[in-house]
């Protein structure tokens, strides 16, 4: 197993620079603000339905992680430190060792700029560093952009349950 990700900058469309780093417990309010700035449709795609007090509940969940089983990366504005534009998370599956489940959220006003794709690349790299063999996630069937991105990143459909598609990427190097 290799060392965890180090903080670094990336550029997305139109040259915007973002800092990719591991989440900190002090990021709870910034995560809540990022989630609160998201559209109802983006919340539905992320949570598969409505969640009462979603921003604060989810923020607490994403910053208080079990570092032995989870990794959460954030994309922070280089121009406005403390402002988060996206977040991606993996958690090792207890039922299937070597497999992690992912979830991702990009602030609604930053969708379509390549940030989601870059965050997924970053978390897949982190999963490889951790020695995982696969990453999977559940995506709503009508979330066409996420399904396309997952396919472009090497995920394949392994199951369809009602309105959910289960996608998996084998990542062993």
Image (cartoon, grey):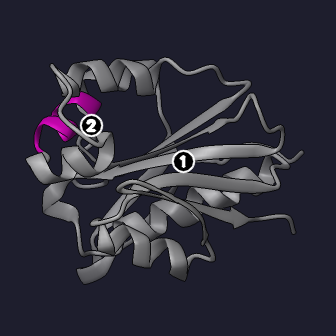
Mark sitting earlier along the chain (2/1): 2
In front: mark 2 or mark 1? 1
x and y percentages locating residue 37 in the rendered image: 10, 43
Tell me how far mark 2 sits from mark 1, CA to CA.
23 Å
Residue stretch in magenta: 31-37
Residue corresponding to mark 2: 82
In the image, taking residue 127 as reference, residue 91 lies left or right, namely left
Mark 1 lies on residue = 102
Label 1: which secondary element: strand
Q: Which residue is drawn at 54% across and 52% down?
A: 137
In the depicted view, which residue is nearer to us: 128 or 168? 168
Look at the magenta stretch and give its main secondary structure. helix
Is residue 36 in view?
yes
> Which corner quadrant of the image does residue 115 belong to?
bottom left
In the figure, residue 154 lies in which quadrant?
bottom right
Which residue: 48% across, 52% down? 138
Q: Residue at x 20, y 44 (%)?
A: 43
Question: Does 85 lie within the magenta span?
Answer: no
Image x and y of residue 116, in percent: 38, 64
Magenta-colored stretch includes residue 32: yes
Total marks drawn? 2
Considering every residue shown, the one lying at the far front of the view is 162
Is residue 126 left or right of 97 when viewed as pictured?
left
Quadrant that contains the N terminus: top right
Can you give x and y, in whole percent of width and height, for residue 10 in the image? 45, 67
Instruction: Using the image, tell me which numbered label, if any, was put on residue 34.
Output: none
């Amino acid at each position: 197993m290799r060392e965890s990700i180090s903080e670094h900058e990336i550029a997305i469309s139109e040259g915007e620079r973002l800092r990719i780093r591991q989440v900190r417990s002090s990021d709870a309010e910034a995560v809540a603000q990022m989630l609160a700035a998201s559209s109802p449709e983006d919340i539905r795609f992320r949570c598969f339905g409505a969640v009462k007090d979603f921003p604060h509940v989810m923020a607490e969940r994403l910053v208080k992680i079990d570092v032995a089983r989870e990794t959460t990366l954030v994309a922070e504005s280089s121009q406005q430190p403390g402002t988060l534009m996206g977040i991606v998370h993996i958690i090792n599956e207890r039922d299937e060792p070597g497999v992690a489940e992912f979830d991702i959220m990009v602030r609604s006003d930053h969708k379509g700029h390549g940030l989601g794709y870059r965050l997924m690349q970053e978390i897949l790299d982190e999963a490889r560093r951790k020695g995982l063999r696969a990453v999977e996630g559940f995506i709503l069937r009508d979330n066409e952009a996420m399904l396309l991105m997952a396919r472009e990143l090497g995920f394949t459909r392994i199951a369809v349950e009602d309105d959910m598609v289960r996608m998996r990427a084998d990542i062993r190097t």
